[in-house]
């Protein structure tokens, strides 16, 4: 039995920016708390944030996420355009309708507590929800947001979600490679066989194509939305300006026309590089603006996989839905290996756990779609991560903006380079295995100073003035 059974839809989740661990996770924790403690019985509620959630919670929108979760909104369907009016209403009226059903007094200024000097031992991202019930009793639960939108309750095993029989048990990259070689199948084919244990192949395909639709919509919106990002750093959005410059002012009314215009704009090396950067910037500018994004495997690194897949879709030859599914299945499996063998939480491992993992996912997926063997896919994933080892997480102002947004462009370019290197080599002769680099990443995470793990207490976060005009 694999030590943790993960689906493609565990790695790719639709949600709201700017952070999977600081926004999506706490949002889900608030939802779970209300399921365990019926809203009708609650007369008062308090939220305590610990560790990294406290230190960078404001910049990452943790308080906003908890409020929306308590108010009964779902991150998958919540209308992001109504976010700020909704939060303003609750803040000004000091009342919240729990689960959308029962209104109680709630003042975010006093009922959400940021305990910046306290941490809980299991994980740096911890929050405790305490409710006073109509009976006069008090109940509380502690949750940990462990990265990528995954949430576990105190005392609950992170891998206790499923206990089903999968056709292929995969604990590490060596398992994955040996299973593919023994069965004579590709990585994406193996993943699809495992996905069938949860749902039909048709349902998996439909779900993946819906994920891709949301990714494309995020890219398109980000490439057509200018202005200043929220948060106080006054960072100017760049993707829309790049889009206009690359298309020389040509406009389009929909995604199909826009893709056609991009293809007609030129396919020289410089143009393609610019478009890849534009795609990645677009996603993470939307993420920073509390827009709709897909964890891949996190929000802070949400631009890498879509940028590389969009590059393949736009500049590849006759890509089909089957190609999109193959890409996403392969990428998800690589993400699963990192989650099982290391971490996808920047609060645990620094930015290597986010941008590094997303670059590795994209590199392996692109390699499979370009005809690479399973061993070449493994090599591409290894190369991409190897050159992200040690990357710290030092967000200025605790915001997912500087250096986070630009890092997605770098992760995407590295992924494509890693894929090309792997395709030109012999994966069976690689000196460093993917398992070795995953283990090294974890060792590096353990050795890394906590001030470089999403706390905004080191690096650029303390070297750059907060009043910069733009990134």
Image (cartoon, rainbow, N blue to C red):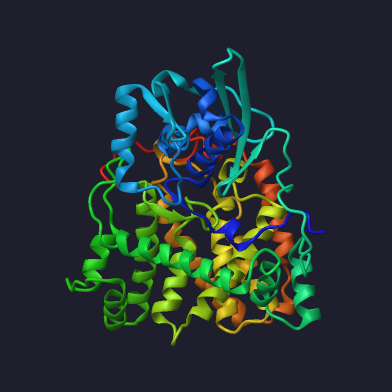
Give the total number of marks visible in the rendering: 0
Q: Is residue 148 above or below residue 178?
A: above
Judge left or right: residue 362 versus residue 471: right
Query: Residue farthest to the top?
Result: 136
Q: Is residue 1 above or below residue 309?
A: above
Quadrant position of residue 347: top right
Q: Is residue 80 above or below residue 396?
A: below
Tell me what residue is drawn at x 71 percent, y 54 percent: 340
Q: Is residue 173 visible?
A: yes
Residue 78 horizontal/vertical position (percent): 39, 47
| Foreground pick, 207 / 371 | 207
Residue 148 horizontal/vertical position (percent): 56, 50
Tell me what residue is drawn at x 42 percent, y 32 percent: 58
Judge left or right: residue 58 versus residue 125: left
Q: Is residue 383 above or below residue 318?
A: above
| Foreground pick, 343 / 467 | 343
Residue 225 horizontal/vertical position (percent): 25, 57
Quadrant position of residue 61: top left
| Foreground pick, 292 / 385 | 292
The quadrant of the picture occupied by the N terminus is bottom right
Tell me what residue is drawn at x 45 percent, y 41 percent: 395
Query: Residue farthest to the left?
Result: 249
Q: Is residue 418 visible?
A: no
Residue 345 horizontal/vertical position (percent): 59, 46
């Amino acid at each position: 039995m694999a030590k943790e059974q993960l689906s493609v839809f565990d790695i790719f989740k639709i949600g709201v920016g700017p952070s999977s661990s600081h926004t999506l996770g706490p949002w889900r924790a608030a939802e779970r708390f209300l399921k365990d403690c019926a809203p009708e019985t609650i007369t008062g509620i308090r939220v305590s944030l610990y560790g990294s959630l406290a230190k960078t919670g404001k910049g990452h929108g943790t308080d906003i996420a908890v409020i929306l979760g308590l108010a009964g909104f779902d991150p998958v369907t919540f209308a992001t355009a109504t976010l700020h009016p909704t939060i303003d209403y609750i803040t000004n009226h000091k009342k919240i309708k729990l689960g959308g059903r029962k209104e109680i007094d709630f003042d975010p200024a006093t009922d959400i507590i940021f305990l910046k000097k306290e941490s809980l031992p299991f994980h740096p991202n911890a929050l405790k929800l305490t409710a006073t019930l109509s009976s006069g009793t008090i109940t509380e639960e502690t949750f940990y947001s462990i990265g990528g939108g995954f949430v576990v309750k105190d005392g609950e095993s992170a891998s206790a979600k499923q206990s089903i029989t999968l056709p292929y048990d995969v604990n590490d990259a060596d398992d994955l490679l040996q299973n593919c070689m023994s069965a004579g199948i590709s990585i994406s084919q193996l993943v699809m066989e495992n996905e069938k244990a949860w749902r039909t192949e048709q349902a998996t395909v439909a779900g993946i194509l819906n994920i891709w639709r949301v990714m494309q919509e995020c890219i398109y919106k980000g490439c057509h939305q200018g202005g200043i990002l929220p948060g106080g750093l006054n960072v100017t959005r760049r993707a829309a300006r790049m889009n206009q410059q690359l298309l020389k002012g040509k406009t389009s009314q929909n995604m199909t026309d826009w893709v056609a215009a991009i293809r007609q704009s030129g396919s020289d090396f410089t143009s393609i590089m610019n478009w890849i950067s534009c795609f990645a910037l677009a996603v993470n500018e939307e993420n920073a603006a509390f827009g709709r994004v897909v964890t891949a495997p996190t929000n802070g690194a949400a631009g890498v996989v879509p940028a590389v897949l969009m590059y393949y879709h736009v500049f590849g030859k006759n890509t089909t839905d089957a190609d999109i599914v193959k890409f996403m299945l392969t990428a998800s499996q690589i993400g699963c290996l990192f989650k099982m063998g290391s971490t996808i939480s920047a609060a645990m491992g620094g930015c290597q756990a986010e941008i590094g993992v997303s670059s590795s996912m994209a590199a392996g997926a692109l390699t499979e779609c370009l005809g690479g063997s399973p061993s070449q896919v493994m090599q591409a994933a290894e190369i991409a991560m190897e050159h992200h080892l040690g990357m710290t997480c030092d967000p200025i102002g605790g915001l997912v903006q500087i250096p986070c947004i630009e890092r997605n462009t770098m992760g995407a370019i590295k992924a494509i380079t890693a894929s090309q290197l792997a395709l030109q080599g012999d994966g069976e002769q690689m000196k460093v295995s993917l398992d070795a680099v995953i283990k090294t990443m974890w060792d590096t995470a353990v050795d890394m100073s906590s001030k470089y793990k999403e706390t905004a207490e080191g690096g650029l976060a303390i070297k750059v003035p907060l009043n910069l005009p733009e990134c």
